[in-house]
Amino acid sequence: MTTFVDRVELHVAAGNGGHGCASVHREKFKPLGGPDGGNGGRGGDVVLTVDQSVTTLLDYHHSPHRKATNGKPGEGGHRSGKDGQDLILPVPDGTVVLAADGTVLADLVGHGTSYVAAQGGRGGLGNAALASARRKAPGFALLGVPGDLRDVHLELKTVADVALVGYPSAGKSSLISVLSAAKPKIADYPFTTLVPNLGVVTAGATVYTIADVPGLIPGASQGRGLGLEFLRHVERCSVLVHVLDTATLESDRDPLSDLDVIEAELRAYGGLDDRPRIVVLNKIDVPDGKDLAEMVRPDLESRGYRVFEVSAVARTGLRELSFALAELVAASRAARPAEESTRIVIRPKAVDDAGFTVTREDDGLFRVRGEKPERWVRQTDFNNDEAVGYLADRLNRLGVEDRLLKAGARPGDGVAIGPEENAVVFDWEPSVTAGAEMLGRRGEDHRFEAPRPAAQRRREREARRDDSQREYDGFEPF
């Protein structure tokens, strides 16, 4: 059964926004109470948050589909719908979030670091919020916006200060078990270690983490063996430690050739040339291993490596190695730039940025793309003529009609708002009033107008009486 997973594909769905409510206040002796429809609630977000207690992506391997809750619709009496609850997904420290095309979206390092993987939809406005001096009693409300649907890839890159690299059975797991309190599986056959192991080491005043990277063999950077699966766990480490086996039973191997092979794989993987290296000659408790270590040490030192002879079994040479690693880790931490306080970056829009684009496609269709037009279309109830007219007014105020005219659109041409897979298509009829002549003075209710002067009301009554009298005088019975 799989117990360690460091790469998964996650399908996340944010909550949909709740619909607004179209309601009119009704109360005894108050027949004209006015619109009182509440707004819909916001849909919940899907948020990835670093949690130190989580060390693997196993949960998302078994359950890759995650969805936040929807916002509740608004109700009459100015009652707004409840917001959807955000879905918090804990991930290990060092998780990288990538888009489907491989673009890095977020690099989550540090406890509490979070990233909104899918944003919840806006709630629709109720007719009370849509009321204005011109539209006193709207007979419609806006629909809630659907939440984001996204497929993201999560990759775990171990956050450690020191990485132990070397051939299988070189003694990396044994070394990490005696340097720290970690208890990895240890055996005398290759590929015993199938997952990276982490340990915490204390050397004087310095505390650092150490990890062993399993499966490095010739061709690992091209996918041979397990090396490619775990090479990315080396990227965040500040110090690399070559663990060389001085007691190998394979006749075609020796510490120098092993070092050359591992270095070639690290170079092929790339991005690790600036990391300081230390060479550890392990298994010197074996007589032949001690002799071989003394033989190859001058060659390694001539290459510029600091060399330590240790035995994980006999626990010799470990103190010197531990403090040398602590020195390199402390130097690496001191060289890092100080963390800057949070800065607010303001990116003003260009003066000529209208917020949307109009393009003419090969088939003659005009396509409108932009955050506002597409959102407004999703919020419109096309079964309500008044809501459609309101959408047309909003598009006109944004300048969509003027842009269509400049693009060469003529009455009857097809216009699509939105992407190809989810667009609203209609035949364009240019009109400055955006169809208001069809709906009259849209959204206005004369019962809500201010009372007229008594003299004006009297003149109107007399005019109606005179009209009725003239019609009666001209009536001829059979």
Image (tube, rainbow, N blue to C red):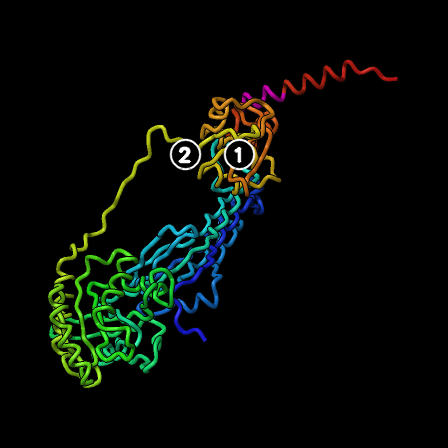
Label of residue 355 in the image: 2
Residue 135 lies left or right of residue 189; in this view the side is: right
Q: CA distance from mark 1 to mark 2?
A: 19 Å
**In the rendered structure, are the residues bearing label 1 and label 2 in contact, judged by CB atoms less than 8 Å apart?**
no
Above or below, comparing residue 369 to residue 465 in the picture: below
Q: Is residue 11 magenta?
A: no
Residue nearest the observer in this picture, 111 or 397: 111
Q: In the displayed structure, does residue 28 sit left or right of residue 197?
A: right
Foreground residue, 431 or 32?
A: 431
Q: Residue at x 27, y 64 (%)?
A: 234
The percent position of residue 136, horizontal first and vertical second, equals: 51, 35
* Above or below for 344 versus 434: below
Mark 1 surroundings within 10 Å by alpha-carbon count, few (fewer than 14), some (14 through 19), many (20 or more): many
- Observer-nearest residue: 472 or 60? 60
Q: Is residue 35 visible?
A: no
- The kind of residue on which mark 2 rests is Gly
Mark 2 surroundings: few (<14), some (14-19) or many (≥20) residues within 10 A: some
Q: Position of residue 221 (x, y in %)?
A: 33, 61
By secondary structure, the bulk of the magenta-drawn segment is best described as helix
Q: Quadrant of residue 92?
A: bottom left
